[in-house]
Amino acid sequence: MGFIRALRGEAYLLTHRRGFRWALIATVATVLLHVFGSWILLEMNRAAGGSGPGESGDWNFWPRFASSARAGLFLVELFLVGLVAAAFPREIASGAIRDPLMRGISRASLLFARAVASLALPLILGGTAIGAAALGAGLFFESGDVMEEGFAVFEEHEVRKEIFLALGHGFPSLVALAGLAVFVSAWFARGAVAVAAGLALVLLPGVLPSGLSSWSSWMFTSTLPGLGAESYLGKAAQFAAGYADALPRSFDRVIQIGWVAPWPALLLCLMFAILVFKNREL
């Protein structure tokens, strides 16, 4: 019963927080500006004697959709860390967290409710980014086979399948990122430190020494669709633009790991978050 009450409170906070509304607006604006900017650059290139529609894969709907969706998801990942990681430290510092505890809601119920609300954020913000990318790319570009100099390099169903797989591949790591943000929020006393720690863990796979690069794929943050050093969506966008070597066979291993690695990471983050939060001084 305490969990249900806590979850209702989290749902209310989620829909009434100014930061969440600004995150939605910023995500949509970023995606649409990315699409519009891509169109402007392509038009300028064509005016200077470059390739036009039917002559380059860059004019196709699918690569523009994928790259714009990735730009939006890049921002979504930053918002996930920023909104979730700073929440508990801010509420503890202001004393707001004592109110639900005094109403008989246990720490475990409060944390589980926060986790459920946080895990919904990737679905809401990520879905918004993808929807805005589809709308924007549809306004400026036409779908169809990927063409280069008048010849079809890839058929439309090939690139469509690859991009949809890449979008689905990114969501497990987004959900795990929300779990990581809950963990650092429960652990650190200062919001700025919690956010910095979360971002450091997100960026860690990209700065590992070359000798450890083979292990970085097992870190779910490496396969994030936006910030990930081994983003499947980034590769799929290049593939959709006509670059056949963007998805080598060696990348299949990264894809397979990316479907699996985020789930145990999510469970570990939530387990450690519970242990830390239950013993934390409020």
Image (cartoon, rainbow, N blue to C red):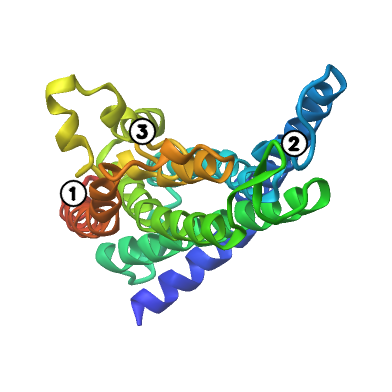
Q: Residue at x 82, y 51 (%)?
A: 139
The earlier-in-sequence mark between 1 and 3 is 3
Quadrant (top left/top right/bottom left/bottom right) for the N terminus: bottom left
Residue 183 position within the rendered picture, expressed as x and y whole percent measured from the top left:
28, 48
Is residue 282 visible to us here?
Answer: no
Dot 3 surroundings within 10 Å: few (below 14), some, or many (20 or more)?
many
Q: Given the image, on which type of amino acid does mark 1 rest?
A: Val
Q: Of callouts 2 and 1, which one flags the residue occurring earlier in the amino acid sequence?
A: 2
Q: Nearer the viewer, mark 2 or mark 1?
A: 2
Return the residue at label 3.
Answer: 229
Disc 2 and disc 3: Cα gap in Å?
A: 23 Å
| Residue wearing tag 2 | 33
Residue 4, given in percent of the width and then of the height, sits at: 41, 78
Tag 1 residue: 276
Q: Relative to 193, does residue 59 appear above or below in the rendering?
A: below
x and y percentages locating residue 76 in the rendered image: 53, 44
Q: Which one is nearer the viewer's eye here, 239 or 83?
A: 239
- Mark before the other along the chain sequence, 2 or 3: 2
